Image (spheres, rainbow, N blue to C red):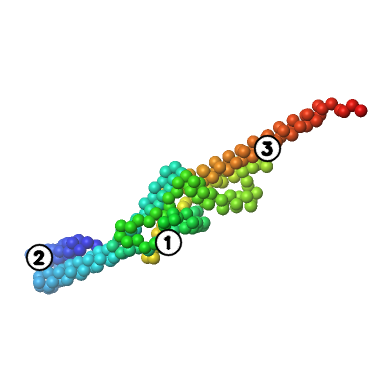
Amino acid sequence: MNWKLAVGVVVCVICALLGLTAGLKLNPQSTMKFVPNWGSLGDWFAAAGTIAAVWVALSQSKKQAEKERPRTKIYQEYKENAWSVRIVSEGLVPVTVLDASLSYDGVREIDLAPWFPQSSVLPKKLERGDALILIDFTENHFMQFSRAIADPLIRELSDSGITPSDGDGGYNEQFFDTLAKASSRGAELLISTAQDDERHQLPEGLVSEMFSIVSREERSKRQEEIRKYEANRRELRQMLEEALNKPSDQS
């Protein structure tokens, strides 16, 4: 609480009590016959001063503790096929970044260390104003990381017999629908420092774009399989027709 507000409350209470006492003394016909002894005015001012001093001390202590607490700010930039994460130390006290990971669906946790730029080796101590780039994905890195997110789910689907193929010459839409639903699940950026663990929401649309990339890639691969399958069928049909139409050798 602000110390000025505390002093104001004390003054208001004193004024109310003084007003009550004066009202009772000026109205002897009042049904209330008992008037409390509130003490001397000096006592009240002394008490108010003590309370104000306590609140000032607490306020200053809180401000000092806030200044001495390490503070960081996370900056994320996301656009199509690109994502960057930068952490900046904004407190007077240095902060040491220990680790960073991505939590997906509240279950899977992906270590981001293999994806750090070469200059960003953890642990890293940041002084006030220092910045550390944790993620700087261009198109290629973005696609590779998208695979790292989606491949565990794809393996689970494959173990359950759900693949992009319908077992014939088409697409298994159940596979692609599952990928689409997975893209809406929650994901958080987890950053561990020597002082605290922080959770940060990912930019809106980031996870959805990652799964969309993987889904398009899987559909494209399946399309190529279907194209080869149809080409083989045409080639086999042609070979059969040629064999059937080939005249028998004359003895």
Q: Nearer the viewer, residue 54 or 228?
A: 228
> From the viewer's perspective, is the residue at label 3 or at label 2 nearer?
3
Amino acid at the residue labelled 3: Tyr
Extreme residue toward the right, this view: 251
Q: Which mark is residue 179?
A: none
**Residue 238 at x, y percent in the picture:** 74, 30
Residue identified by numbered label 1: 122
As measured in the structure, the alpha-carbon distance from the residue carrying label 2 to the one carrying label 1 is: 70 Å
Q: Nearer the viewer, mark 1 or mark 3?
A: 1
Q: CA distance from mark 1 to mark 3?
A: 49 Å
Residue denoted by label 2: 22
Q: How many marks?
A: 3
Residue placed at 42% from the left, 43% from the top? Answer: 79
* Residues packed near mark 1 inside 10 Å, few (<14), some (14 to 19) or many (20 plus): some
User: Which label's residue is closer to the chain start, 2 or 1?
Assistant: 2
Q: How much space separates mark 3 and mark 2, taking CA atoms? A: 101 Å
Marks 1 and 3, the one that precedes in the sequence? 1
Tag in front: 2 or 1: 1
SS state under label 3: helix
Q: Which residue is mark 3?
A: 229
| Depth order, front residue of 250/126 | 250
- In the displayed structure, would residue 138 be above or below residue 190? above
At horizontal 45% and vertical 49% (from top left) the residue drawn is 137
Q: Check disc 3: other Cα within 10 Å, few if <14, some if 14-19, many if 20+.
A: some
Q: Residue at x 64, y 36 (%)?
A: 227
Please give left or right for residue 236 compared with residue 97 in the image.
right
Q: Quadrant of the N terminus?
A: bottom left
Residue 40: where, in percent of width, then height? 10, 72
Quadrant (top left/top right/bottom left/bottom right) for the C terminus = top right
